[in-house]
Image (tube, rainbow, N blue to C red):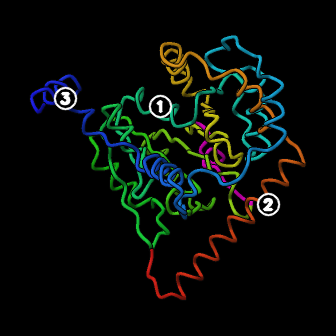
Amino acid sequence: MRATQRLLRALVSEELRRIPVSPTLHINEMVHSLKGQGKEIFHFGFGQSPFPVPDVMVDSLKRHAQQKDYLPTRGLPELRLTVSKHLKREFGIDQFSPESVMIGPGSKQLLYQLFLLFNGDIMLPSPSWVSYYPQCLLAKKNVKVLKTSKDSNWHVTPEELERQCQETAQGTPKMILLNSPCNPTGQCYSKEELVELTKVFRKYDITVIADEIYGLLHNKGEQVCIASVYPEKTIIASGISKAFGAGGWRLGYVAIPPALSEFLHTMDCIASETFSATAAPIQYASIEAFKQSKELETILQKQRKILAGVGSYVHKELSEAGYKYI
């Protein structure tokens, strides 16, 4: 038996055997399993939205369930147009035309493609979402960790960014991923902080990925995207899993500025040889998510209020119970 196991292990790349299962997904699977056994589980992971998918999206999915044809690899044109308008309306960013938007089966897959194609070092803040680092390892990229602290609200500072850039070999292309609101800290960058970081970005010609997956859930609805102050080399990544409660639908997008158009072409090629296209009914239904409507705005406002209330309640209860946390 042991000899057989050794032979089977030898068939799998040693590098890939070192990559663990995503902790967040593993926890979700454990919760489902324990609930299936009839046990009462208090699930504290808000990574999966507790809110239902808006009715307008569900109704659209029903209407388009018969859509079975392959769609363009880059995504349904009507959806890409709607995302382009959404970015301009929500964040005041008008540089992303429909042609600069790509749709994929979740922003997670698209982030991995960006790491894969980038020819340089990737800088990740610590702490950050648990899948960024393993994805970079899968893509065989050199990762530089940016240290943060409580004093800076767990934000990357211009000084730390400058230090890391100076330690990197001269001439090496650099990419940084910024997630705001941040998973796991919940902190958001202010416009003033982003303006200061941008000075370093321009000095070292850094490519930025702005993971805006939680952007619409900013508790005050006042999200500031880095692309609004560093438009020339900021890629926006987001999707429908958090603000619209549709994590299992698996749909995300990236918006890539004109200066990085080669990224879009390469991602198009990768997609054509891997997932081909995102599920057609899901793409049609997702158009509704990015349209301007009073119904969806009301839903988002309620979600923000509930999430802010949960955060305040947990903070109060833990503090009164004498727990220390960072």
Q: Position of residue 254 (x, y in %)?
A: 60, 33
The three-letter code of the residue at mark 3 reads Arg
> Judging from the image, what secondary structure is the residue with disc 3 in?
helix
Residue 288 in magenta?
no
Other residues around mark 1 within 10 Å, as few (<14) / some (14–19) / many (≥20): many
Q: Residues within 10 Å of mark 2 (few under 14, many from 20)?
A: some
Residue on which disc 3 sits:
9
Q: Amino acid at mark 2?
A: Lys
Is residue 178 positioned above or below 276 on the image? below
Q: CA distance from mark 3 to mark 2?
A: 50 Å
Callout 1 secondary element: helix
Of mark 3 and mark 1, the one earlier in the sequence is: 3
Q: Residue furthest toward the front?
A: 38
According to the picture, the residue beneath numbered tag 2 turns out to be 302
Q: Amino acid at mark 1?
A: Leu
Q: Which mark is residue 114?
A: 1
CA distance for labels 2 and 1: 33 Å
Residue 97 image position (x, y, % from top left) = 72, 27
Q: Which residues are magenta?
A: 221-232
